[in-house]
Amino acid sequence: MENLLKKVREYIREKFKGVYEFGGGHGYRYFHALRVMRSVERYASSSKVDLTALRLACLLHDIGKLVKEDGELRYEEDEERHAKIGQRLLWRCLESSEQMKS
């Protein structure tokens, strides 16, 4: 599962690195995802949750805000749409991780 986490982290970094966000610059969302992940790790370390799954959720939480338009990726706020996309990707990651264990 750690290998999957590494792959997702690289995927997120690649996807967000070219996206400019006003007030945040290039790659802001990637670093935001890392900050969210570190914050959650501090609180979750004392609980019995699957920390790797939680890390994946943190990394993927904003991926649905990327929209490809005219060949360029841009950032768009659409709370309902982006949450559903992030959730679908998280489930796929977790399913593939379970399949790798079998």
Image (cartoon, rainbow, N blue to C red):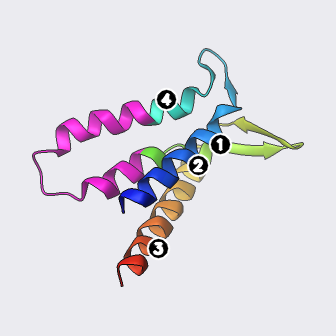
Q: Residue at x 41, y 71 (%)?
A: 97
Residue type of the residue flagged with mark 4: Phe
Residue type of the residue flagged with mark 2: Tyr
Query: In the image, is 21 to the left or to the right of 31?
Result: right
Q: Is residue 98 above or below residue 88?
A: below
Residues at discs 1 and 4 in contact (Cβ within 8 Å): no
Mark found first going from the N terminus, 1 or 4: 1
Range of magenta residues: 34-58
x and y, in percent, of residue 27 in the image: 60, 28
Name the residue that disc number 4 marks. 31
SS assignment at label 4: helix
Name the residue that disc number 3 marks. 96
Q: Is residue 44 above or below residue 98?
A: above
Residues 69 and 52: in front is 52
Question: For the residues marked 3 and 2, what is the alpha-carbon distance in whole angstroms?
Answer: 16 Å
Query: In the image, is 74 to the left or to the right of 77?
Result: right
Q: Main secondary structure of the magenta part?
A: helix
SS assignment at label 2: helix
Residue type of the residue flagged with mark 1: Lys
Mark 4, Cα crowd under 10 Å, few <14 / some 14-19 / many 20+, is some
Name the residue that disc number 2 marks. 11
Name the residue that disc number 1 marks. 15
Q: Residue furthest right?
A: 70
Residue type of the residue flagged with mark 3: Ser
Mark 2, Cα crowd under 10 Å, few <14 / some 14-19 / many 20+, is some
